[in-house]
Image (cartoon, helix red, strand yellow):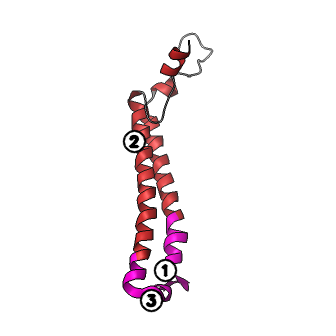
C-alpha cells in the first residue's frame, strides 16, 4: 500500500506532465536569475573595491547614498519584484492556454435546452 502512494506523489524534482514540467522550468529560471543577480552585484561591488579602492567606492553616490548601498539594498529587491511579476504573467498566460483545468468545474445552467 505504501509503494502505490509514493508512486503518485508530486515532486518538484520529478514533475509529471508537460504543464508541470513547464512550471518547474520557469521556477528554475527565476531562481537562476535571482542567484545570478545576487552573485553578480556582489562581484561588481568587490571588483569596484579592488580596482578603484574602497574610498572611491564610497565616493560614488546616487541620491547622496553610496553606490554599493543602491546595488545591494535597492536593485536586488527591485529585481526580485520584476522576477515575480514576470513569473506571474507567464503563469497567467500558461493557465489561460490550458483550458482543461478551467472547464472541468463549469457550472451548469438550470435550462434543459442548453
The circle drawn on residue 25 is 2
Identify the residue at image location x=49%, y=77%.
68
Res 35 seen here: yes
Magenta stretch contains residue 46: no
Labels in figure, total:
3
Q: Which comes before the other along the chain, label 3 or label 1?
A: 3
Q: Which comes before the other along the chain, label 2 or label 3?
A: 2
Image quadrant occupied by the N terminus: top right
**47 up-or-down from 21: above or below:** below
Of helix, strand and loop, which mostly describes the magenta segment? helix
Kindly identify which residue carries mark 1.
Answer: 67
Res 63 seen here: no
Disc 1 is placed on an element classified as: helix
Residue 7 in percent (x, y) is at: 48, 20
Q: Which comes before the other along the chain, label 2 or label 1?
A: 2
Kindly identify which residue carries mark 3.
Answer: 56
Disc 2 is placed on an element classified as: helix
**Is 86 or 70 nearer to us in this picture?**
70
Residue 86 in percent (x, y) is at: 45, 52
Q: Badge 1, how many Cα within 10 Å: few under 14, some, many 20+? A: some
| Dot in front, 3 or 1 | 3
**46 up-or-down from 104: above or below:** below
The answer to whether the residues at label 2 and label 1 have Cβ atoms under 8 Å apart is no
User: Which residues, given as a range, are shown in magenta?
Assistant: 47-76
Amino acid at each position: 500500500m505504501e509503494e502505490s502512494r509514493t508512486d503518485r506523489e508530486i515532486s518538484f524534482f520529478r514533475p509529471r506532465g508537460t504543464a508541470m514540467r513547464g512550471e518547474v522550468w520557469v521556477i528554475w529560471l527565476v531562481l537562476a536569475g535571482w542567484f545570478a543577480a545576487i552573485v553578480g552585484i556582489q562581484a561588481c561591488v568587490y571588483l569596484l573595491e579592488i580596482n578603484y579602492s574602497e574610498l572611491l567606492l564610497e565616493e560614488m553616490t546616487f541620491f547622496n547614498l553610496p553606490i554599493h548601498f543602491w546595488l545591494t539594498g535597492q536593485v536586488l529587491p527591485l529585481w526580485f519584484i520584476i522576477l515575480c511579476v514576470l513569473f506571474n504573467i507567464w503563469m497567467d498566460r500558461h493557465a489561460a492556454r490550458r483550458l482543461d483545468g478551467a472547464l472541468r468545474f463549469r457550472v451548469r445552467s438550470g435550462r434543459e435546452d442548453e
